[in-house]
Image: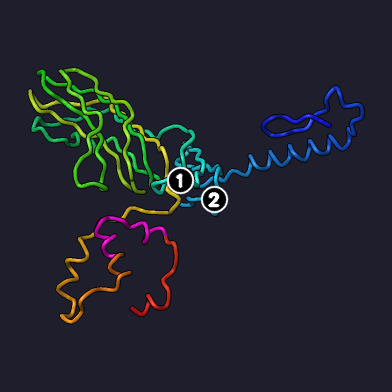
Amino acid sequence: MPGQTPILRLPYPLPADALVDYPALGQNLATLLEQTIRQTLAIPRLTPAQWPPANPVDGMLAILNVAAPITWLFRYNANAGGGYPWEFLGGPPLTANLASIGNFTNDGTYQPASDADGPAITVPKTGDYLADFHAAILSGTAGAFGCGVQVQPVVANATQLGTLPAAQGTTLSNVPSTITNQLTGATIRLRYQATAGANAQTRYRALRLWPTRVANTATVLRARPEPVLPQLEPLLEPEVEQLDDDVLELLQRADNGDYDFILAGDREPGPEELQR
């Protein structure tokens, strides 16, 4: 009985095999190698517009061609929670750099520098990400300075990650920090802060972004509308005591910012829903 390799189970003869049908063994080995190579070459390679792969199965691999030459490898985890089953396996980060000099004031707010609103990176697919940055901060006098990552326009206020105090002529950097639930098309930017001393300058800035897991939907960035239910209440007829339970649930989910049931396109509305 031929032996087998532990992973791919490729056959090979053992010394104890008195008789080996080498033609049959060679044909079996060639067939298994061909199947293995075809599976490897068949890993789908998709652009952000083509994502996600059709009919994924647990353990499936897929490559996202983010922006040449950046590609990311993902594995589908059917048991993953949180709506992000494509788990990142490897690939270089997206990067943005600025070498110019930008000024910012010491009013204590996080603000863009005068030379450019950045560096900035656009989120390619909805999911959880890691971000880190590097920036040189210069000032004529010592003071408290900061640099952080702002997420726009997913949240109303800036999200500062790894904000650090600095003296004059100090370089600020941070370890990778998690930014969760980012939507396709959101913009990640650097912001700068001075809370004491003179106005400051920044130069030699870098921002990096790479995923930890992404969604299995073609969700795109949508602006959050005003709450729906308060606008509907004045329009309801006095004799209408309550909305249809299904409609009410959808409206409440929309008010809470849950748009996946709309954006994912899970199904078409039925005839009864179209008549409502």
Q: Quadrant of residue 121?
A: top left
Circle 2 crowding by C-alpha within 10 Å: few under 14, some 14–19, many from 20: some
User: What is the magenta range?
Assistant: 250-264
**Residue bearing mark 1:** 85
List x then y, in percent, for residue 168. Answer: 15, 18
Q: Amino acid at mark 2?
A: Pro
243 or 76: nearer the eye?
243
List x then y, in percent, for residue 204. Answer: 28, 25
Circle 1 crowding by C-alpha within 10 Å: few under 14, some 14–19, many from 20: many
SS of the residue at dot 2? loop
SS of the residue at dot 1? loop
Please check the rendered image and state whether residue 251 is part of the magenta-colored stretch, yes or no: yes
Q: Residue at x 78, y 32 (%)?
A: 11
Residue 204 placement, left or right of 1: left
Asked whether disc 1 touches disc 2, contact meaning CB atoms under 8 Å apart, the reply is yes
Q: Amino acid at mark 1?
A: Pro
List x then y, in percent, for residue 43. Answer: 59, 43
Q: Quadrant of residue 226?
A: bottom left
Gap between marks 1 and 2 measured at Cα: 10 Å
Residue situated furthest bottom in the rendering: 239
Q: Quadrant of residue 32?
A: top right
Residue situated furthest right in the rendering: 19
Q: Residue at x 20, y 40 (%)?
A: 158
Please check the rendered image and state whether residue 237 is part of the magenta-colored stretch, yes or no: no
The kind of secondary structure the magenta stretch mainly shows is helix
223 or 259: nearer the eye?
259
Q: Is residue 127 above or below residue 201?
A: below
List x then y, in percent, for residue 17. Answer: 87, 27
**Residue bearing mark 2:** 56
Q: Residue at x 87, y 38 (%)?
A: 24
